[in-house]
Image (cartoon, rainbow, N blue to C red):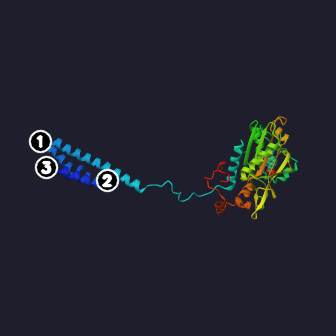
Amino acid sequence: MSDVADLEGSTLAAVAAAADLAALDTVRVAALGKAGNVTALMKTLGAMSPEARLVEGPRLNALRDTIAAAIAARKTELEAAALDARLASESLDMTLPVSPGPAGTVHPVSQVMDELAEIFADLGFAVADGPEIEDDWHNFTALNIPESHPARAMHDTFYVAQGEQPAPAGHPAAGGVIRHLLRTHTSPVQIRTMLASPPPIRIIAPGRTYRSDSDATHTPMFHQVEGLVIDRGIHLGHLKWTLETFVKAFFEVDDITLRLRPSYFPFTEPSVEVDVGCSWRGGTLSIGGSESWLEILGSGMVHPRVIAACGLDPDEWQGFAFGCGIDRLAMLKYGMTDLRAFFDGDARWLRHYGFKATDVPTLSGGVGA
Ligand code: PHE
């Protein structure tokens, strides 16, 4: 009788004293394990007389249950304490800066494309695109540059070495011959857009373009953004207002003067080249004012033949288009001087001129980030 009471007392004391889960488990094994002392007592029941077992059985069962319950309770306590300790030691300060800092930057060309999309989205323009490997019908013929036209030679075109092929059935040039090439401008996206969906159309199309040309200001691959509006009653005034609004928003300068010079593109009539006014401030030329002029884009009213080539009636639908070099826009806005560095993939240049991935251009936050 006192054996059982002693055992209970000492085991419960050991349970209470167990400082961690490992110590508690040692106590459990010593009492309830195969060779444990409570287990050994339980084994004596077998050799007892039925009368004695009737008395001892419930007592020993109660002993075992009390100890098991005490161990379970202590285990819960120790686990909670261990969790608290871990939470205290592994606390995370979410307000600390990221470490190591984010690697990689957004290339200025991508940043400018995002800025353009943001500015023109505000004016109701969607973003369209087209293939970089074009065919000569979309790149030239439909843009009113027929086979013999000198403008074809002027474009320094990279042709894809597969020769001439009869235009497949369903191709807009069906019945003729097509040649594949790397698009020399984004203007074929005008054609693809007009063929794909009915007017009214308001799109910009930023993307890569290719010409066999290479020096400090020309790279064989470069970037353009095309703009196209087709609707009823569109005139040169719409073009001028749109370009002014765009240039003001892009350079974040209100004092913008645009100079529209008569020019020639086969796919626009009339055609205008657009210069932006600049002035000298502290030895550098900056956008704004009208001391000097920088050419930024070509534009004009979409030629009726181009509208007709896309199956639209030029008496009903008019529009304007513009094409602008994105790399040059980036250089003017962010002050890079050598175009070739854009495509060198030099990590130091990218770290210097690149943008944080979180610098998403927004009109309200300033598109210049
Ligand atoms: N595609 C012309 C170029 O690359 C630019 C342009 C586009 C001009 C649209 C007028 C209208 O030079």
Q: Residues within 10 Å of mark 1 (few under 14, many from 20)?
A: few
* Of marks 3 and 1, the one in the foreground: 3
Which numbered dot is residue 2? 3
Query: Few, some or many C-alpha atoms within 10 Å of disc 2 (few <14, some 14-19, many ≥20)?
Result: some
Point 23% across, 45% down: residue? 66
336 or 93: nearer the eye?
93
Q: Specify the label residue 296 is tagged with.
A: none
User: Which tag, 2 or 1, sits closer to the chain's start?
Assistant: 2
The residue type indicated by label 2 comes to: Leu
The image position of residue 211, as x and y in percent, is 78, 54
Disc 3 to disc 1, C-alpha distance: 16 Å
Give the residue type that dot 1 points to.
Answer: Ala
Q: Which residue is mark 1?
A: 52
Q: In the picture provided, is 57 more to the left or to the right than 131?
A: left
Q: Nearer the viewer, mark 2 or mark 1?
A: 2
Question: Looking at the image, do the residues carrying marks 2 and 1 touch, with CB atoms under 8 Å apart?
Answer: no
Task: Kindly state the secondary structure of the residue where label 1 is placed.
Answer: helix
Query: Which residue position is annotated with label 2?
Result: 21
- Cβ of mark 1 under 8 A from ligand 1: no
Residue 348's spot in the image, x, y percent? Answer: 64, 63
- The reply, left or right, for residue 255 in relation to residue 47 is right
Q: Position of residue 36 (x, y in %)?
A: 22, 51
